[in-house]
Image (cartoon, rainbow, N blue to C red):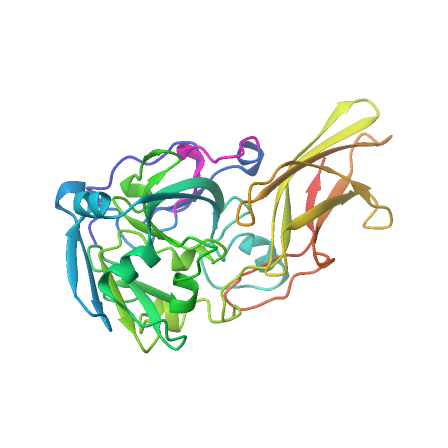
Amino acid sequence: MDYTTEPPHSDKLFVQAPQPFNAEPPVASLVEFAYTPHELVYCRNHGPVREFEEAEYMLSVNGAVDQVISMSIPQLKSTFTKARVVAALQCAGNRRNEMGAIKPVHGVGWNSGVIANCVWGGIRLRDVLSYVGVHTDDLLHVCFASFATLCQDDEYYGASIPISRAMKLEDDVLLAYEMNDEPLSAEHGGPMRVVVPGYLGARWVKWLDTIIVSSEESPNYYQQRDYKILPPETALPLNSVIGSAFKSSPSKLRVKGYATPGDCGNVAAVEISTDNGATWHSSKITYQEGKYSWTLWEGEIPVMESSGEICSRAIDLAGNIQPKEGQWNIRGVAFNGWSWMKW
């Protein structure tokens, strides 16, 4: 694979693998922003990053549809109404290094910065499906593919979601061409990628050029073999992460972090402890926007020691509590044990 023509990458990221380029930001920087700045959005790739001209880039929709279409992005923009959604994009391998410390795992070694909360702009997938004509049979699947780029484990990158999820009126699955009100860069899947709020990032196919409505899930490696340890709906579990912890005065410790919901309702609270969970202190939620954004939180608690260790746990609206220990698996995905940080 040729990596010599890739566009420049952000210098604000820690490189975890150079080819393909996989990198993440420091979490202390990440939690300072409600919307993740472009230069702090992590990069997860399975092959070279390529740049494409928006005016020449084509999206085809075929399969179990009444009419097959092939449109350029300018044509798509003029045909369908623009929509916006705030959603956190999160790699299933977030916090993999913590799981790997328990027992070795397979995959890129990630810390806890493989997440980005952004405003995504694009066209609704359900509008496109209604335009081409599909049946709302719950047994159908919408398969996404990028034949425009090369990848490591298959001839193309592909994924799919149930058509029932694609057609939900209350939740917008987008074919996005903007991130934070700017054109989607090549590094993050431009000129068009899928945005599936609430699903792991592996389903948010970058450089999208083909949609197939099918009676079967995508046959692609990344749908059929990778991430199969996760639940069928591909929701990631309730989680919290400490981004920074520092003495704000001789007797106070200030802590900041983020939290993400599971599939049982949004994050309702995040608690912090300096005595291994014997005593929990409340934190303040400083940002939360809709049910698919991340939650930012911060707290200040009294401490007399000059150093120590602090942990966090999240609680959702249904009363579920983030577990102390995450469940180990060979792929190192969906780790959600308490977050720990020395201060």
Q: Is residue 46 visible?
A: no
**46 and 162: which one is in front?**
162
192 in relation to 263, above or below: above
Instruction: Give the magenta range.
Output: 32-43
Q: Which residue, as the protein is rendered here, is positioned at the far left? A: 56
Total of numbered circles in the picture? 0
Extreme residue toward the top, this view:
249
**Rendered position, 83 above or below 165:** above
- In the figure, residue 162 lies in which quadrant? bottom left
Left or right: 43 with respect to 240? left
Q: Position of residue 122 (x, y in %)?
A: 32, 45
- Image: 12 above or below 337: above
**Which sits in the foreground, 297 or 337?**
297
Residue at the (70%, 60%) spot, across then down: 325
Q: In the picture, which quadrant includes the N terminus?
A: bottom left
Quadrant (top left, top right, bottom left, bottom right) of the C terminus: top right
Q: Where residue 323 sits in the image (x, y, percent)?
A: 71, 59
Residue at 23 percent across and 70 percent down: it is: 65
Task: Describe residue 339's horizontal placement relative to residue 46 as left or right.
Answer: right
Please determine whether, in this image, residue 241 is positioned above or below residue 250.
Answer: below
Magenta stretch: dominant secondary structure: loop
Residue 247 drawn at (x, y percent): 75, 26
Visible in this render: residue 69? Answer: yes
Residue 105 lies in magenta, yes or no? Answer: no
| Residue 301, image quadrant | top right
- Residue appearing at x 43%, y 64% in the figure: 165
- For the point 76% across and 45% down, which residue is it? 271
- Percent of width and height locating residue 334: 56, 60
